């Protein structure tokens, strides 16, 4: 029988929020059902499983496909794709009702007069493969695997926690169909990234290619930039918009020249996780 190889890798999931009314519903599902469901499934081969709360979207951040709920991070000791290749049966299926995908803005909202899924419960991997519908304003479920360590360092090596807290902008890009990784990266590394890193407002910049072989993620690269504050991000972005050359394959007329949510999607974060679930989770204990 095939055994999964040792394969340390990190995964990132972006969780959007369709409307503020749904935040408490999504939080309830995440902390009451999803954390224990997840740990019971992958606890033996995941060393870290954490939720990072999304910070408020700064003015202008919407056009970068910014998600509004959280980023979920896993550190895997075995390649999940390998695990799926040998015979195994889940004793319990994840509790993943379609409402969750509506709350996350991955499926159309019936409350807005749109039809939604008929399933009573999704198998978790099927839910995580949801593509979204640009015409209906929904967004894809972004689940990306990247190396444990950052592959490329563009600015700020040597920074420590003593240098102060960081306003982190993490985002992923997907180059348009027909644009090679080499062509897209050339623009990103020679135009987009330098337009930011040349400014004092950017204190750190790192990047990695997305490992598509694990789950066929459609996005190509993840980038993380750090700033002192949201206003510093706004200032740097205003300056970058004046510097970055529009590529021949641009999807939009205006900077960043990529379709929001489908060509670029990101999140604003602080330094710390709201919950490091493998060590901190003790159940859904309500306030009294």
Image: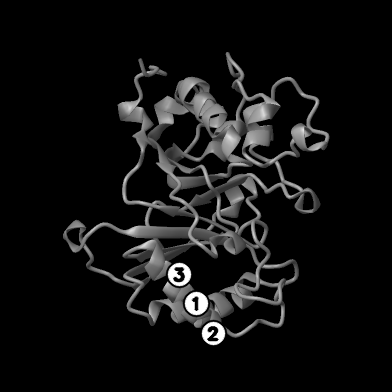
Give the total of numbered labels: 3
Q: Residues within 10 Å of mark 1 (few under 14, many from 20)?
A: some
Q: Residue furthest left?
A: 162
Characterize the local packing of mark 3: few (<14), some (14-19) or many (20 or more) Cα atoms within 10 angstroms.
some
Split into 4 quadrants, where in the image is the C terminus?
A: top left
| Vertical relation: 245 (above or below) 44 | below
- Visible residue check, residue 152: no
- Tell me if 262 is positioned left or right of 119 in this view: left
- Residue 189 tag number: none
- For disc 2, the marked residue is 242
Marks 3 and 2, Cα distance to the nearest angstrom?
13 Å
Residue 14 point in image, percent of width and height:
54, 46
Front one among 31 and 183 = 31
* Point 62% across, 41% down: residue: 19
Residues at marks 1 and 2 touching, judged by CB atoms closer than 8 Å: yes
Q: Position of residue 10 (x, y in %)?
A: 44, 47
- Assign the N terminus to one quadrant of the image: top right
For residue 277, say whether it is visible.
yes
Tell me what residue is drawn at x 59 percent, y 34 percent. 21
Residue toward you, 190 or 244 = 244
Q: Using the image as rendered, state which of residue 77 and residue 219 is in the foreground.
A: 219
* Category of crowding for the residue at label 2, using alpha-carbon neighbours closer than 10 angstroms: few (below 14), some (14–19), many (at least 20): few
Residue receiving disc 3: 234
Q: Position of residue 196 (x, y in %)?
A: 44, 76
Q: CA distance from mark 1 to mark 2?
A: 7 Å
Residue drawn at x 60%, y 85% is 245
- Find the distance from the CA under tag 1 to the CA under tag 3: 6 Å
Q: Is there a contact, CB below 8 Å, between mark 1 and mark 3?
A: yes
Position of 122 relative to 20 (above/below) = above
- Which element carries disc 2, helix, strand or loop? helix
Q: In the rendered image, which quarter is residue 230 located in?
A: bottom left
Q: Which residue is labeled 1 in the image? A: 238
């Amino acid at each position: 029988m095939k055994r999964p190889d040792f394969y340390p890798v990190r995964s990132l999931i972006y969780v959007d929020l369709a409307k503020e009314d749904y935040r408490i519903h999504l939080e309830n599902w995440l902390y009451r059902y999803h954390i224990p469901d997840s740990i019971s499934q992958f606890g033996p081969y995941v060393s870290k499983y954490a939720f990072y709360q999304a910070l408020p979207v700064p003015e202008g951040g919407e056009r970068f496909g910014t998600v509004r709920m959280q980023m979920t991070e896993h550190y895997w000791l075995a390649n999940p794709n390998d695990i799926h290749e040998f015979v195994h049966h889940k004793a319990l299926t994840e509790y993943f009702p379609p409402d969750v995908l509506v709350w996350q803005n991955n499926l159309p909202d019936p409350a807005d007069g749109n039809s939604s899924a008929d399933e009573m419960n999704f198998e978790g991997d099927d839910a995580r493969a949801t593509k979204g519908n640009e015409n209906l304003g929904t967004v894809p479920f972004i689940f990306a695997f990247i190396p444990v360590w950052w592959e490329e360092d563009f600015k700020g090596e040597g920074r420590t926690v003593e240098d102060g807290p960081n306003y982190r902008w993490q985002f992923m890009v997907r180059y348009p169909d027909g644009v090679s990784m080499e062509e897209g990266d050339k623009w990103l590394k020679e135009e987009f990234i330098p337009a930011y890193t040349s400014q004092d407002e950017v204190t750190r910049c790192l990047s990695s290619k997305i490992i598509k072989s694990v789950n066929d993620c459609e996005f190509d690269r993840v980038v993380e930039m750090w700033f002192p504050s949201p206003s510093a991000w706004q200032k740097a972005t205003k300056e970058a918009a004046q510097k970055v050359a529009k590529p021949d394959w641009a999807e939009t007329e205006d900077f960043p020249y990529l379709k929001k949510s489908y060509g670029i999607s990101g999140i604003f974060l602080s330094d710390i996780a709201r919950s490091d679930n493998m060590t901190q989770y003790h159940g859904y204990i309500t306030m009294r």
